[in-house]
């Protein structure tokens, strides 16, 4: 039986709901994270959050499962309050989550501190990730001009969902439909008719009429750009440029540092790698959809 340092048993793991928002926020702060109230609200309403109540009040730990189809899910917000560390709560929460996920392949972003636990549970590293953070410098050539994207309208959502499903390889529409309300800004790049027709004939490009979309949302003092889904590195850079043009303060983008399209360009725009994680997978992991179009996740809580 799991217990605190005074021998007081922890209550059973339970499903968290919207009523637990303030305790989830407090748990983030306890671990030195930003409060992340908006992200927690989204996850509590749309994903499956689990937690353990602390004997002295609040939450002792949490973890979130987001499902995309019967065969794919992700883990996020795996947190244990500092005063309850090394009591087995992290393993118990992850074991509970994997049982809930059943036979799905499960992915997550792991810090160096978390990797040993996940490896013991059967996760393996499938790629690297880095958070690029800083004040975005517009290029002299841009001179305040937009890069070719425009704000999303309600009429664009069907195309965004189609484009995203083809790239991601699973349906995460239940989360993406919340983006217009969750994000501060949401932009899309359209394809012209000739490009779309040629792309469809080739079998590899979008038939949805768009070649990329991205969102920007606040996480404390930093603006996160994600998701970022684009048909090419050029389209990804256009979307970042247009979203960052409206940001006062620092920007964060989480991406694979081993891909060539963005890291050096972001360094030249003033963003530096501030932290590094590993994307790990549990179960029968294999690339889905078109990974070349997946530049940045919605959040590292949603691998």
Image: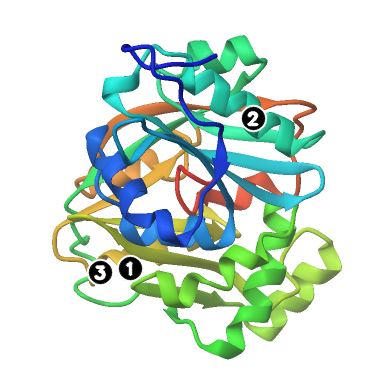
Is residue 303 visible to the viewer in this orientation of the structure?
no
What is the spatial separation of the Cα atoms under label 2 and label 3, in whole angstroms? 50 Å
Q: Counting residues from the N terminus, which is met first, the one under dot 2 or under dot 3? A: 2
- Estimate how packed mark 2 is, as few (under 14), some (14 to 19) or many (20 or more) residues with alpha carbons within 10 Å: some
What is the spatial separation of the Cα atoms under label 2 and label 1, in whole angstroms? 38 Å
Q: Residue at x 59, y 83 (%)?
A: 156
Q: Nearer the viewer, mark 1 or mark 3?
A: 1
Is 45 situated above or below 263? Answer: below
Image position, residue 224 (x, y; %)? 33, 55
Q: Residue at x 78, y 58 (%)?
A: 204
Q: Secondary structure at mark 3?
A: loop
- Estimate how packed mark 3 is, as few (under 14), some (14 to 19) or many (20 or more) residues with alpha carbons within 10 Å: few
- Which residue is tagged 2? 96
Q: Residue at x 60, y 9 (%)?
A: 120
Is residue 194 visible to the viewer in this orientation of the structure?
yes
On the rendered image, what quadrant is the C terminus found in? top right
- Which residue is tagged 3? 142
Image quadrant in which you'd find residue 170 = bottom right
């Amino acid at each position: 039986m799991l217990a605190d340092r005074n021998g007081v048993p922890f209550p059973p793991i339970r499903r968290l709901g919207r009523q637990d928002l303030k305790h989830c926020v407090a748990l983030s702060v306890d671990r030195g994270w930003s409060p992340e109230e908006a992200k927690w609200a989204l996850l509590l309403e749309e994903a499956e959050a689990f937690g353990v109540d602390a004997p002295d009040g609040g939450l002792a730990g949490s973890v979130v499962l987001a499902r995309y189809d019967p065969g794919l899910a992700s883990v996020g917000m795996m947190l244990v309050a500092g005063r309850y560390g090394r009591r087995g709560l992290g393993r118990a929460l992850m074991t509970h989550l994997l049982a809930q996920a059943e036979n799905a392949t499960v992915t997550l972003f792991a810090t160096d501190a978390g990797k040993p636990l996940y490896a013991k549970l059967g996760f393996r590293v499938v790629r690297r990730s880095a958070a690029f953070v800083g004040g975005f410098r517009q290029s002299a050539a841009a001179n305040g001009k937009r890069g070719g994207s425009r704000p999303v309208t309600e009429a664009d959502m069907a195309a965004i969902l189609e484009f995203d499903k083809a790239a991601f390889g699973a349906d995460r529409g239940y989360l993406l439909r919340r983006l217009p309300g969750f994000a501060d800004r949401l932009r899309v790049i359209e394809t012209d008719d000739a490009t779309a027709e040629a792309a469809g004939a080739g079998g590899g490009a979008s038939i949805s009429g768009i070649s990329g979309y991205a969102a920007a949302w606040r996480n404390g003092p930093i603006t996160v750009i994600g998701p970022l889904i684009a048909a090419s590195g050029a389209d990804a850079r256009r979307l970042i440029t247009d979203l960052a043009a409206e940001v006062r303060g620092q920007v964060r983008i989480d991406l694979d540092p081993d891909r060539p399209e963005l890291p050096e360009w972001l360094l030249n725009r003033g963003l530096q790698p501030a932290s590094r994680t590993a994307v790990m997978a549990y179960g029968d992991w294999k690339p889905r959809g078109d990974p070349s179009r997946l530049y940045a996740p919605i959040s590292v809580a949603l691998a």
